[in-house]
């Protein structure tokens, strides 16, 4: 078998597995085997760049970075839908339809109204060529690189598809994946996302497609537009789309009467919480495409379709008490403790109030009857007060001005909605929060230790910062509650093992405000060791790609603190990694020091991310747009002509990939 045949075979096989897993939800291979095959394909592709295929399953992992999403015109306009809320609305619509169509028999396709971000995908010769957001309906943003990372979007179709067509759908973030994402954010000390819909639509505009690839997004399709598609009804459209490899939910119904339609609506109004993703209604469409054609469009929506909105999920209940939580960074979050109430299938006892402004905006007070709403959020929100039920003599909420845990006066800096407890070293939830962050999976990943253990060790005065972890002995631990010899041993070993964790993760583990995983990596790579980083000024730090003022200040402040410096000295003594490893250093030079390089186009041997990493590894900075300060423009294939003109105009030298590699050699 030739390498090309081998490539094709692997690609086909992996496409089929992707389809089974992400579209049909019935995998036929283990995750491990899949990863092995994917890796084999990646290797072959690196060896044979000449067989590049824009529909290869390896592209699912992303990596392309888009700085500015191009605005593109939709070939077929994307319309809105008219809304209805009652049986009467629905019957009126049917009458209007019937008036246009005479006595011709009618049928309706009912589909769920998926609540996400609308998307239009263009396929040519069975390959995905473009993905555009809805935008204003006539033009949207080209988000193709990001959409390609969504595993249920076929890059290559199956069966007897038309040569060219657009298909419309909705990008959604299923509840389960959303909850998982939020659990991770909370564990990392980040604010959880508000709801799946906004998170889904925000994901489409992320610049780094590798981040999009990590989000469990899904794409549900419902409508095909194009010439000569060979389709003559909405129902057939759904079936065909499924055949060609698209994910089209099977919850849909072909109805003859509006009574049947209502039955479908009522059923899903109560059962929608059993679905894996968010929906906000039912879309009813005249089934025959010929009839759809006769009905046509108003200026903003099709006359042949109608959205029937579900009732908003809202309840009212009494707000018993407002309490305040202190996070690892000292941020205060007010929490509404509610009289337990059933909402959207779960009992709700608490709701987040976000910050002082939110409370003031709605004038929320203890004792009030409040309206609580639940979308896909894990934490329900308060959307207003039932002022008619406000008890006499109630007074406006006075936001706390001292920390509920340590009584320190709270600080609120301008431009920040939150109040902070500044007692960094003495405030218990901040102390334990920092240690919990340090041991967490993405940080030092200390085995044999969990959040409760940290609480316990802190209560027993065995630890007050993360450096203390390294002094723990088996003898100290064994007398503690629920601590058998084995677990004490595991804990001590886990801590000892953590000195192997690489510098970039140590940087994240330190828990410097605004220094998340990515920033930690950037800092570690740019400075190579902690001493250099500790000596850096705000100006020097902001010269590092993507490090802003806010982060720079926070880093400087952290290292200026004597206690932090002492903790770091101690960690060094215990053997924790505070510099890049030999391997990592080997590829690094200062050749490009002080230079900003811009990368544009598609490259033969290196990926764009690899190129960017090489620039950074060699001391350079990656620029996002060409300016007089750009040292070089590295141009690949398909670079936009406007970039070239701009570079030439500014006298920025344009070099090829191989010239760049020579420069470094
Ligand atoms: P609206 O934004 O309220 O005008 O509703 C129109 C939007 O509903 C469309 O742009 C689609 O993105 C979305 N939608 C969700 N599910 C469907 C569906 N099954 N059929 C048609 N549109 C849908
Ligand atoms: Zn405090």
Image (spheres, rainbow, N blue to C red):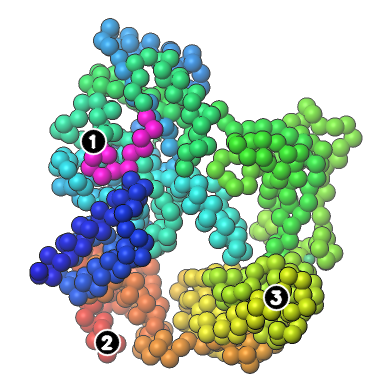
Magenta-span inclusion, residue 249: yes
Secondary structure found at label 1: helix
Vertical comparison of 475 with 263: above or below: below
Q: Quadrant of residue 93?
A: top left
Residue 225, given in percent of the width and then of the height, sits at: 24, 35
Magenta segment boundaries in residue numbering: 241-252
Element on which disc 3 rests:
loop
The residue carrying mark 2 is: 663
Of badges 2 and 3, the one in the foreground is 3
Within the image, what quadrant is residue 114 found in? top left
Neighbourhood count class around disc 2 (C-alpha, 10 Å): few under 14, some 14–19, many 20 upward: few
Alpha carbons under labels 2 and 1: distance apart: 53 Å
Query: Which label sits in the foreground, 1 or 3?
Result: 3
- Residue 369 located left or right of residue 213: right
Q: Which mark is residue 240?
A: 1
Against 457, is 404 above or below?
above
Query: Who's the residue at 31% across and 18% down the image?
Result: 107
Q: Secondary structure at mark 2?
A: helix
- Inter-mark Cα distance, 1 to 3: 61 Å
Q: Foreground residue, 490 or 516? A: 490
Report if the CB atoms under discs 1 and 3 are less than 8 Å apart. Answer: no
Percent x, y of residue 2: 10, 70
Image coords of residue 462 (percent x, y) = 77, 79
Residue hosting label 3: 484
Horizontal side, residue 662 vs residue 408: left or right: left
C-beta proximity under 8 Å, tags 2 and 1: no
For marks 2 and 3 on the same chain, the one whose residue lies earlier in the sequence: 3
């Amino acid at each position: 078998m030739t390498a090309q045949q081998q490539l094709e075979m692997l690609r086909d096989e992996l496409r089929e597995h992707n389809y089974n897993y992400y579209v049909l939800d019935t995998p036929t291979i283990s995750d491990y085997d899949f990863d092995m095959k994917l890796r084999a394909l990646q290797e072959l592709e690196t060896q044979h760049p000449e067989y590049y295929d824009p529909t290869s399953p390896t592209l699912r992992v992303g990596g392309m970075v888009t700085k500015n999403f191009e605005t593109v015109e939709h070939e077929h306009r994307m319309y809105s839908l008219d809304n209805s809320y009652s049986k009467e609305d629905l019957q009126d619509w049917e009458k209007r339809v019937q008036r246009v169509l005479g006595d011709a028999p009618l049928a309706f396709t009912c589909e769920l109204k998926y609540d996400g971000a609308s998307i239009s995908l263009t396929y040519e010769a069975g390959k995905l060529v473009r993905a555009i957001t809805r935008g204003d309906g006539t033009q949207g943003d080209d988000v193709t690189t990001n959409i390609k990372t969504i595993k249920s979007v076929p890059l290559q179709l199956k069966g007897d598809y038309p040569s060219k067509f657009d298909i419309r759908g909705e990008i959604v973030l299923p509840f389960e994946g959303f909850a998982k994402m939020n659990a991770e954010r909370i564990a990392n000390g980040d604010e959880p996302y508000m709801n799946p819909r906004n998170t889904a639509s925000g994901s489409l505009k992320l610049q780094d497609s590798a981040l999009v690839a990590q989000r469990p997004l899904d794409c549900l399709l419902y409508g095909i537009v194009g010439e000569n598609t060979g389709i003559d009804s909405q129902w057939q459209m759904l079936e065909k789309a499924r055949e060609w490899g698209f994910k089209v939910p099977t919850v849909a119904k072909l109805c003859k009467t509006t009574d049947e339609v209502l039955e479908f609506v009522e059923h899903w109004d109560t059962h929608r919480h059993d679905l894996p993703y968010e929906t906000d209604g039912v879309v009813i469409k005249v089934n025959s495409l010929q009839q759809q054609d006769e009905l046509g469009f108003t200026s903003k929506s099709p006359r042949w379709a109608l959205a029937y909105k579900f009732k908003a999920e809202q309840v009212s209940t009494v707000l018993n008490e407002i309490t305040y939580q202190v996070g690892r960074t000292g941020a205060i979050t007010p929490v509404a403790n509610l009289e337990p109430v059933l909402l959207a299938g779960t009992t709700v006892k608490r709701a987040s109030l976000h910050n002082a402004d939110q409370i003031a905006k709605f004038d929320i007070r203890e004792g009030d009857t409040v309206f609580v709403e639940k979308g896909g959020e894990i934490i329900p929100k308060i959307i207003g007060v039932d002022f008619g039920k406000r008890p006499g003599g109630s007074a406006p909420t006075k936001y706390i001005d001292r920390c509920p845990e340590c009584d320190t006066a709270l600080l609120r800096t301008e431009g920040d909605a939150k109040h902070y407890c500044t007692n960094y070293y003495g405030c218990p939830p901040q102390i334990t929060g920092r240690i919990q962050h340090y041991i967490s999976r993405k940080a030092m990943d200390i085995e044999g230790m969990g959040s409760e253990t940290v609480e316990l060790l802190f209560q027993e005065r065995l630890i007050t910062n993360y450096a203390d972890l390294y002094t723990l002995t088996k003898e100290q631990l064994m007398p503690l509650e629920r601590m058998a010899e084995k677990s004490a041993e595991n804990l001590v070993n886990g801590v000892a093992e953590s000195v192997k964790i690489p510098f970039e993760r140590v940087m994240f583990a330190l828990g410097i405000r605004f220094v998340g995983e990515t920033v930690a990596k950037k800092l570690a790579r740019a400075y190579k060791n902690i001493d250099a980083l500790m000596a850096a000024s705000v100006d020097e730090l902001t010269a590092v790609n993507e490090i802003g003022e806010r982060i720079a200040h926070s880093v400087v402040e952290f290292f200026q603190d004597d206690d932090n410096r002492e903790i770091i000295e101690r960690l060094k003594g215990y053997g924790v990694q505070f510099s890049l490893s030999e391997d990592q250093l080997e590829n690094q030079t200062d050749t490009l020091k002080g230079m900003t390089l811009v990368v544009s186009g598609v490259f033969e041997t290196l990926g764009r991310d690899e190129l960017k990493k090489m620039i950074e590894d060699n001391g350079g900075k990656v620029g996002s747009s060409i300016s007089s300060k750009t040292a070089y423009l590295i141009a690949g294939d398909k670079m936009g002509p406007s970039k070239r003109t701009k570079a030439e105009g500014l006298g920025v030298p344009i070099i090829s990939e191989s010239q760049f590699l020579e420069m470094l050699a």
